[in-house]
Image (cartoon, helix red, strand yellow):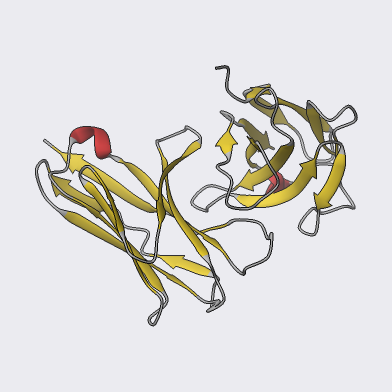
Amino acid sequence: EAGVAQSPRYKIIEKRQSVAFWCNPISGHATLYWYQQILGQGPKLLIQFQNNGVVDDSQLPKDRFSAERLKGVDSTLKIQPAKLEDSAVYLCASSLRQTSTDTQYFGPGTRLTVL
Amino acid sequence: RKEVEQDPGPFNVPEGATVAFNCTYSNSASQSFFWYRQDCRKEPKLLMSVYSSGNEDGRFTAQLNRASQYISLLIRDSKLSDSATYLCVVIPDSGNTPLVFGKGTRLSVIA
């Protein structure tokens, strides 16, 4: 079974530039998550989708971050404009159902460096 | 007090040793607990869920102490391949709330 796919794997940009990340969840998984993992920290949830609707975006810095999952399958996360503190690994995860206890499967992540 | 706290380590242990990690959580209403494993520069993967009665999976044992609000992970007969960061994960209440991850404890098993 194919896992969660993410691209690009690495991205280096200068501050104030824009960047976008893409995620394709496991086939049939209704719930998709975007996490930010800063070096030395655990992952922190940015946004959760159930199909193409947002369930939780309370920790998404909405002044610069946006995300969409238009057809309820793949998703993009955008940062515009980027700041130095956005340097992190951006992890996408998916689960079959919406329940918190459902196992989440993570993609390999996109490592973002903002200079 | 942070929602989920772990000793960051690193724990450096020889092969064959037994090692234990603890994790404390702040919300007494927390219902579900997990340990995830994250290899260097890789994604987190679910290692095991933690049940009230405790549970064992091969060399790994997880326990929950609700009164003291901590969970533990015991690894017996450590292997080189156990070297990784172990993330404590809590669902803070009984609703459908997001996972909260600890910072992780780094384990290095040395030959």
Q: Is residue B80 visible?
A: yes
Q: Could you say where residue B83 lies in the image, as x and y percent from the top left?
A: 28, 39
Q: Which residue is the extreme one toward the top? A: A1
Residue in view at x 11 percent, y 40 percent? B15
Q: Could you say where residue B62 lies in the image, as x and y percent from the top left?
A: 31, 57
Is residue A51 positioned above or below A86 on the image? above
Q: Which residue is the extreme one toward the bottom? A: B67
Q: Which residue is the extreme one toward the front? A: B53
Residue in view at x 84 percent, y 30 percent? A72
Is residue B55 positioned above or below A103 on the image? below
Q: Quadrant of residue B16?
A: top left
Left/right of residue B4 with respect to residue A36 in the rendered view:
left
Is residue A78 positioned above or below B86 on the image? above
Image label count:
0
Is residue A80 positioned above or below B6 on the image? above
Q: Could you say where residue A93 lies in the image, as x and y percent from the top left?
A: 63, 37
Left/right of residue B75 with respect to residue B85 in the rendered view:
left
Along the line of sight, the residue nearer the viewer: A53 or B82? A53
Q: Is residue A66 visible?
A: no
Along the line of sight, the residue nearer the viewer: B79 or A25? A25
Left/right of residue B65 with respect to residue A28 in the rendered view:
left
Q: Could you say where residue B27 lies in the image, as x and y percent from the top left?
A: 55, 76
Residue in view at x 85 percent, y 47 percent? A54
Which quadrant of the figure contains the C terminus of chain B?
top left
Residue in view at x 68 percent, y 65 percent? B95
Along the line of sight, the residue nearer the viewer: B16 or B53? B53
